[in-house]
Amino acid sequence: MQNFNFQNSTKIIFGKNTENKIGNEVKKHSNKILLHYGGGSIKANGLYDKVINSLKVNNIEVIELSGVKPNPRVSLVREGISLCKKYNIDFILAVGGGSVIDSAKAIAAGVNYQGDVWDLFTGTPINHACLKVATILTIPAAGSETSSGTVITNEDGFYKLSTGHPSLRPVFSIMNPELTFTLSKYQTACGIADMLAHVMERYFTNEKNVSVTDRLCEGTMKSIIENGINLINNLDNYDYRAEIMLAGMVAHNDSLSIGRIGDWASHDIEHEISAIYDIPHGAGLAIVFPAWMKFVYKHDINRFVQFANRVFNVEININNLEETALEGISRLESFFKALNLPTLLKEANITDEYIDEMARKLTAYRDHAGSFVEIRYKEALSILKLAL
Ligand code: NZQ
Ligand code: ZN
């Protein structure tokens, strides 16, 4: 097990009607905020009015910036940075999903940086003060409500890159599962795939003697699979919505990765796909992860056998471990199919036209992706071909 420091300071306010506490909670930090949100779902379902009302009651001045798109763009981040500077804002409230939260974090990181914010995604470390961010989460998926990371797309060249800093963890996140009832079946499924992927990225490690976190990961994955299927067949069930919302947070709050080094190659490859094709991140992961697994399983067949057995209840064939490992991958694909997600690029109407470009871009700003197995151009191309 690796040495580690673990601190996740995000306060979680979870449950029914918790969005009504927003004014009170913000007041503890600021009297003037940037309210950041997406394309209109929060207005359609009444959340916007509740938030504005609660902020007003608490005499909080609000500057608004809407229009965050899924796979959030750096151009809007730059606009947010200008607004924060103009109005002297030190606190950003993100109301939405991972895209809105990530956009808020990028603004928070960019305000006190002298250069262009995109530098912070291409290698310049964040070593200056960031603004505070808080969230009201409306889609359980990315885990950005407690994570220290942010993923942004640069329309100039279609690069999608991440950066992070502990100070970008939201100071608090309000999570009311009722706010997720308006999500479509497809968006719900994409979120489930993403949170499962966050655990798998941590699970496939070269670190030995990590039995406690292995078991925590396995329990979380089993719970996501069980509740995910139940939820997709009962979208109006509060209890399933609540389990999945909690799971999305647990999957990415870093408690499952203590003492181990995660992989993250599937995420990095997926980001190349959604940068060009603008598909939901979770759908991209349902395509990439099985292909990555087929490419790397021989690297540590025992870990894949353990995954197959403990997560997908595959009986171990001691005379043919490869068969057991492959059955685990096949059951993962079946799970994604049961969620009605694509598991091949062609099912998302993606051809081989840009796979060379995607594989090349993967190492544009890093030496390699992944740590379980190091992935460079050649390996990425093989994985993308397996996904065709
Ligand atoms: O824009 P609006 O109108 O709000 O619509 C959104 C959007 O179209 C809609 N939506 C959200 N809540 C809703 C709702 N529709 C109805 N009812 C609701 N309650 O859902 C659509 C997708 O939203 P988005 O925020 O894009 O989804 P998600 O949370 O999956 O975020 C995806 C982004 O997060 C990044 C991904 O790469 C992607 O860009 N990630 C961020 C991570 C992090 N910061 O730690 C880690 C992840 O691995 C991931 O990479
Ligand atoms: Zn993800």
Image (spheres, rainbow, N blue to C red):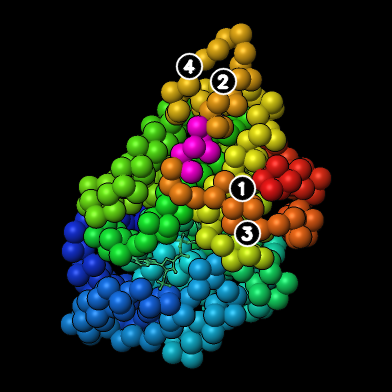
Residue 332 is covered by the magenta coloring: yes
Range of magenta residues:
331-337
Reading the chain from its start, which is encountered first: label 1 or label 3? 1
In the image, residue 111 above or below residue 207: below
> Is residue 259 visible from the viewing direction of this image?
no
Give the label, 4 or 3, closer to the camera.
Answer: 3
Lateral position of residue 366 relative to residue 341, left or right? right
In the rendered image, which residue does mark 4 sit on? 315
Q: CA distance from mark 1 to mark 3?
A: 9 Å
The amino acid type of the residue labelled 4 equals: Glu
Within 8 Å: ligand 2 and the Cβ of disc 4?
Answer: no
State the residue in front, 65 or 133.
65
- Residue 344's disc is 1
Q: Disc 4 vs disc 2: Cβ atoms closer than 8 Å?
A: yes
Query: Toward which corner of the image does residue 293 lie, by quadrant?
Result: top right
Secondary structure state at the residue bearing disc 4: loop
Q: CA distance from mark 4 to mark 2?
A: 7 Å
The amino acid type of the residue labelled 2 equals: Thr
Give the label, 1 or 4, closer to the camera.
Answer: 1
Reading the chain from its start, which is encountered first: label 4 or label 2? 4
In the rendered image, which residue does mark 3 sit on? 349
Position of the N terminus, as image quadrant, is: top right
In the rendered image, which residue does mark 2 sit on? 324
Lateral position of residue 377 relative to residue 75, left or right? right
